[in-house]
Image (cartoon, coloured by chain):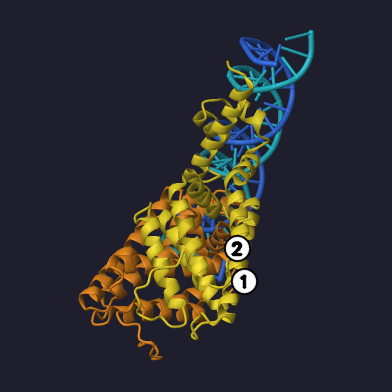
Chain colours: A yellow, B orange, C cyan, D blue
Amino acid sequence: MRRSKADAEQTRLKILEAAEVLFAEHGIARTTLEQIARAAGVTRGAFYWHFKDKTDVLSALYERTTAPQLALIREASEQADLTDPLAFLECSGTRFLSVFAADRCQQRMHRIMSNAAMSEETAAWLAQANAELWRVFQRLLARAGEAGQLTDELTPDEVAVSLMVMFNGLLNEWLRSDRAFPLDTLGAKLLHHHIASLRRQPACAEGGPTP
Amino acid sequence: MRRSKADAEQTRLKILEAAEVLFAEHGIARTTLEQIARAAGVTRGAFYWHFKDKTDVLSALYERTTAPQLALIREASEQADLTDPLAFLECSGTRFLSVFAADRCQQRMHRIMSNAAMSEETAAWLAQANAELWRVFQRLLARAGEAGQLTDELTPDEVAVSLMVMFNGLLNEWLRSDRAFPLDTLGAKLLHHHIASLRRQPACAEGGPTP
DNA sequence: AGCTACATACATTCACGTATGGATGTAAAC
DNA sequence: GTTTACATCCATACGTGAATGTATGTAGCT
């Protein structure tokens, strides 16, 4: 029986960690509070002391990992260098991929959010996050279109769809395939190639990205 | 009270339809047999007469929609014209997109399968389907590599990853965005552009695809 | 001593599975 | 064509376990 102030916070974190792992592995609905408590080395009593119910843990997990990440994206897009939006997208996209590939928490939250798109709360979160991303892409690519950087074959909005598909597709496919390919290196490579194909003159120059 | 032979088959279909809609909307775990029965205009008694349990309906739904579709993909890939694998991929991929965009059942099954990737049975189905798709892509692109059709910048396997990402990404993003863009026309356009960027010499020629 | 941080015990709900009953279709017998 | 016998198709009722939420107990920090 340990009930120090720091100990309490520790068990709270253990519960959060256990819930995150179990949610990502078996889904939210199929995970029971008993399982979470056992995995955290406590009983349901501890759970109900720290959290109201299952959705409360979910909120805590979201606030801990996803929300800050979303804020970072928002900030970065506002301070973006708009003289070369495509280069900015490639640079920050590549950075995000390598961070994501190394952060188990983000990976688990991604699985949780995308697989629980019906659970009212997560549905709203996911919709908001994607709307946010979409607005960023749309804004940057509209700018790129004005600057004459984009191919004639596609409109700026179509390019935005293409990039959303590529980017989210990379994350989804990597997780679904159980990390069958190196997300950081190959992801950067594919992103570079794809963005290059969206530039006005896809010259065969071997020049690298401009981070 | 009607219990003719044809009537029975009709209620069976109504139960299947209701289950498909509810599974796609609220997820499998969060859907109750009572809800399915009510949506089908019957009671749980009728459900248990036609099906063993919840996973039994899922199997029936899979056999009805997803399995035949998978078989079609397999057949097509075996009878593929291997002289121009990239053109074949673009052609059959485009056709699949337009069929998918018009078939509510396939769309619902896609949501169900991708959001229930933890439920033991669907996990195996999804893994099998994706492994199947992966083998097809790998085989066709290895052939394209031998024929010297691919860019020097990417290996055939990397191109396969790129195409998997693009293709699955299109379906996922379309459904997630609640059909915010025209999957058939824009999907075909992006697929064409992307495949063109994977060819050896991305000449700026405006030549259309060769279906 | 009083509150914190849990464990334990209890009550309740809810979905599931099964058992039963009944109304009608279906086929054979006459 | 009617009647009988039976199987089909489905509704209703009941039993059960599992998960939830709450109430209570209690050892230790402060």
State which chain disc 2 sits on.
A
Q: Nearer the viewer, residue A192 or B48?
A: A192
B161 left or right of A142 in image = left
Residue at the extreme left of the image, as rendered? B146
Which of the image's four quarters has the N terminus of chain B?
A: bottom right
Q: Is residue B190 above or below residue B154?
A: below
Whether pointer 1 and pointer 2 mark residues with C-beta atoms closer than 8 Å, the reply is: yes
- Residue at mark 1 shares a chain with residue at mark 2: yes
Residue A149 visible in image: yes
Measured as percent of width and height from the top left, residue B176 is found at 56, 64
Q: Please give the name of the residue rendered at 54% of the width and 34% of the height, measured from the top-left corner.
A: A36
The CA span between labels 1 and 2 is: 9 Å
* Residue that mark 2 sits on: A77
Q: Is residue A118 above or below residue B158?
A: above
Q: Residues within 10 Å of mark 2 (few under 14, many from 20)?
A: many
Q: Judging from the image, what secondary structure is the residue with disc 2 in? A: helix
Q: Nearer the viewer, residue C7 or B37?
A: C7
Q: Is residue B133 above or below residue A148?
A: above
Q: Nearer the viewer, residue A95 or D18?
A: A95
Kindly identify the amino acid type of the residue bearing the numbered disc 1. Arg
Which of the image's four quarters has the C terminus of chain B?
A: bottom left
Q: Judging from the image, what secondary structure is the residue with disc 1 in? A: helix
Q: Please give the name of the residue rendered at 45% of the width and 72% of the height, measured from the top-left corner.
A: A195
Q: Please give the name of the residue rendered at 50% of the width and 65% of the height, measured from the top-left corner.
A: B172
A90 left or right of D15 in image = left
Kindly identify the amino acid type of the residue bearing the numbered disc 2. Ser
Q: Nearer the viewer, residue A15 or D10?
A: A15
Closer to the N terminus: mark 1 or mark 2?
2
* Residue that mark 1 sits on: A139
Q: Where on the picture, by quarter, is residue B2? A: bottom right
Measured as percent of width and height from the top left, residue B72 is found at 35, 72
